[in-house]
Amino acid sequence: MTTATELSVTANTGPAAEPGLPTIAVRELWKIFGPAERKLADPPAEESSADFRTRTGSTIAVRDVTFDVQPGEIFVVMGLSGSGKSTLIRCLTRLIEPTFGEILLDGDDIRKADQAKLREFRRRRFSMVFQHFGLLPHRPVLENIAFGLEIRGEPKDERLSTARRMLSLVGLEGHASNYPDQLSGGQQQRVGLARALAVDPEVMLFDEPFSALDPLIRRDMQNEVLRLHNEVGKTMIFITHDLAEALKLGDHILIMRDGRVVQSGRPEELVGAPADGYVEDFVREVPKSRVLTLRWIARPPTPEDDLTGPTFPSTAVIRTVVHAAVASDKPIRVVDDGALVGVVDRVQILNAIAGVEGEDTTP
């Protein structure tokens, strides 16, 4: 899901990241709303949010959040209304000023940026796609797509040329001269995607962009994000309240509650080993065979195993190997880069399909 192919969009315009350096690094981030924010020298780490609100009349919206976003991944932040997820994403670009903590973009400290550098971050290295499309109603589609480039001062011919390429990339050829009110909701959101891509950002931020769309259109737009991600390879941070959407899109998922991180990990880690009852309630109805991978249920081979059975990568989702498991009485060989890392037998496959938790299902 994170492999970039030959692009219609060029590489990002930010400085080259050091090998192994996360694209975004967030450390001990806090956001407090209210009069107490200006008076605090340090985070109120030992005080509950409820007690803090009662004592100060202020609200802790984001509490001690730490995470890394790796280059080229879709990083999903999920939580219910009031969990702090939208405040968090706005803190990343300082649309909301954090109270405490550190935010690094390829090692650049965003919190220390002056206004000129912050504008540069927002115009060239970040782009945002919102739930409400924010299209300019008096401008045709092509000019809406080119608007960010216009703000950057790029020549008209160049920005319109880029906008035409983006129009083709999101499948809206033939709509260049239409106005936003002549488009469906899904088409308007495609224009929003094209506008975000046109500035060739290093990181794309999505704040619940599809929550107002009908279910079928929403599914189509999720597929569109995955297609575009495969084509352009951008690092994406996606905010949602919907677990199914998070599991479909996310390479990595962070779940928030009351401003805190409840659990963070790969989709299979959340489904296979929920951190607490809150996460367990979220994932209870998820068909495990559609999320868990072979690496999750693989066991070490034993001398009794016949290692001539079917071979699958460790990242294969369980349900995709059911036919091979049924067709062979030999265990499936699980490999990483050609090296054997474990085996999976039919009993393990059937248990995973049935949602049975075995003692040896944790990698």
Image (spheres, rainbow, N blue to C red):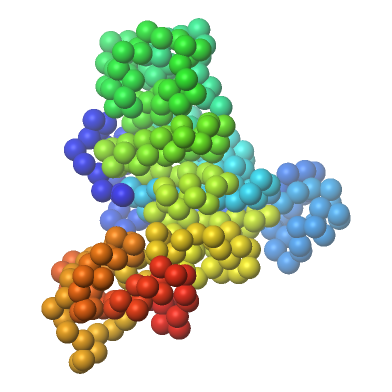
Residue most extreme to the front: 327
Given residues 321 and 362, the one toward you in this image is 321
The residue drawn where x is 80% and y is 44% is: 35
x and y, in percent, of residue 302 in the image: 24, 89
Instruction: Examine the image and state in which quarter residue 177 appears.
Output: top left
189 shown above or below 85: above
The residue drawn where x is 37% and y is 39% is: 223
Given residues 278 and 70, the one toward you in this image is 278
Given residues 131 and 86, the one toward you in this image is 131
328 shown above or below 91: below
x and y, in percent, of residue 279 in the image: 58, 63
Query: Can the viewer see residue 20?
Result: yes
x and y, in percent, of residue 76 in the image: 47, 49
The residue drawn where x is 49% and y is 50% is: 244
Horizontal arrangement in the rendering, residue 80 relative to residue 195 (left or right): right
Residue most extreme to the right: 55
Tell me how many marks there are: 0
Question: Which quadrant, please, contains the C terminus?
Answer: bottom left
Residue most extreme to the bottom: 303
Horizontal arrangement in the rendering, residue 158 relative to residue 40 (left or right): left
Instruction: Examine the image and state in which quarter residue 275 appears.
Output: bottom right
265 shown above or below 121: below
Given residues 90 and 343, the one toward you in this image is 343
The residue drawn where x is 73% and y is 67% is: 46
